[in-house]
Amino acid sequence: MTDGATEDSDGAEGAVPDPEDLETHVRVLRRYARALMGNPTGADDLVQETLKRALIHIGKGRQVRNLRSYLLTILHNVRMDQIRKEKNHGQQVPLDEAMTVAEPATQPHRLEYNRLLAALSELSEDQRAVLLLAGLEGRKYREVAEILGQPIGTVMSRLNRGRAALRRRLDEEAPSQAAETGYGERDKPVRRRHAR
């Protein structure tokens, strides 16, 4: 990435990001894409298309103030394009994923993780994107609004509604999950304070 078209993630104008900084950005994109998609193959495709578009635009001399926000914005736009295509043509499932026989997880922490992913996947795309950018990626409301191209009030509203919906889904699922795993409220470890 030459031509002085980019700034590093700290905002130093005209600086070209070093390879380690780019690796960090790619890790952030992959983490966000995997959480957003719930599918590693689809997430990797999403990141690849994001990087391709970024290279094309930056190669044309486009000025970028914050590379991480710029890349997350592109990723969001690529995902919106995918959603529009899926509505028109249906979602494609890779053959290797269609043929995989799932085996239920037996470890409680893995079950909790799977419950969270399932609850996240039930949220609307808008709520999930805001929750992941603010919660998982730690982006500020203003930055989330810029990335998603939404007013900050809309971002705050979607975040609030998304958190409430996620909480409801997890609370609804908790009793049935306890029955499946054998872990219930009374099975949780109790910490007792000792008298001194």
Image: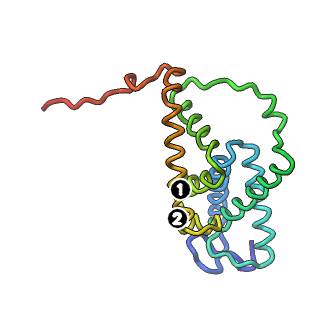
**Quadrant of the rendering where the C terminus is positioned:** top left
* Element under disc 2: helix
Mark 2 and mark 1 residues within 8 Å of each other at the beta carbon: yes
Query: Looking at the picture, how far across and down is residue 9, in whole percent?
Result: 59, 69
Would residue 174 be found to the left or right of residue 31 on screen? left
Q: Nearer the viewer, residue 34 or 119?
A: 119
Crowdedness near tag 2: few (<14), some (14–19) or many (≥20) residues, C-alpha within 10 Å:
some
> What residue is drawn where x is 85% and y is 51%?
88
Query: Looking at the picture, how far across and down is residue 66, in whole percent?
Result: 62, 71
Crowdedness near tag 1: few (<14), some (14–19) or many (≥20) residues, C-alpha within 10 Å:
many
C-alpha separation, residue under disc 2 versus residue under disc 1: 9 Å
Figure check: 52 above or below 14 = above
Would residue 60 be found to the left or right of residue 168 on screen? right
Q: Amino acid at mark 2?
A: Tyr
> What residue is drawn where x is 19% and y is 29%?
194
Furthest residue in direction right, as rendered? 89
**Quadrant of the rendering where the N terminus is positioned:** bottom right
Query: Looking at the picture, how far across and down is residue 38, in whole percent?
Result: 67, 43
> What residue is drawn where x is 58% and y is 77%?
12
Q: Nearer the viewer, residue 129 or 30?
A: 129
Would residue 43 be found to the left or right of residue 87 on screen? left
Residue marked by disc 2 = 141
Which callout, 2 or 1, points at the residue further toward the start of the chain? 2
Q: Mark 2 vs mark 1: give the one in front.
A: 1
Residue marked by disc 1 = 159
Question: Quarter-wise, where is residue 94 in the image?
Answer: top right
Figure check: 93 above or below 163 = above
Q: Amino acid at mark 1?
A: Leu
> What residue is drawn where x is 58% and y is 69%?
151
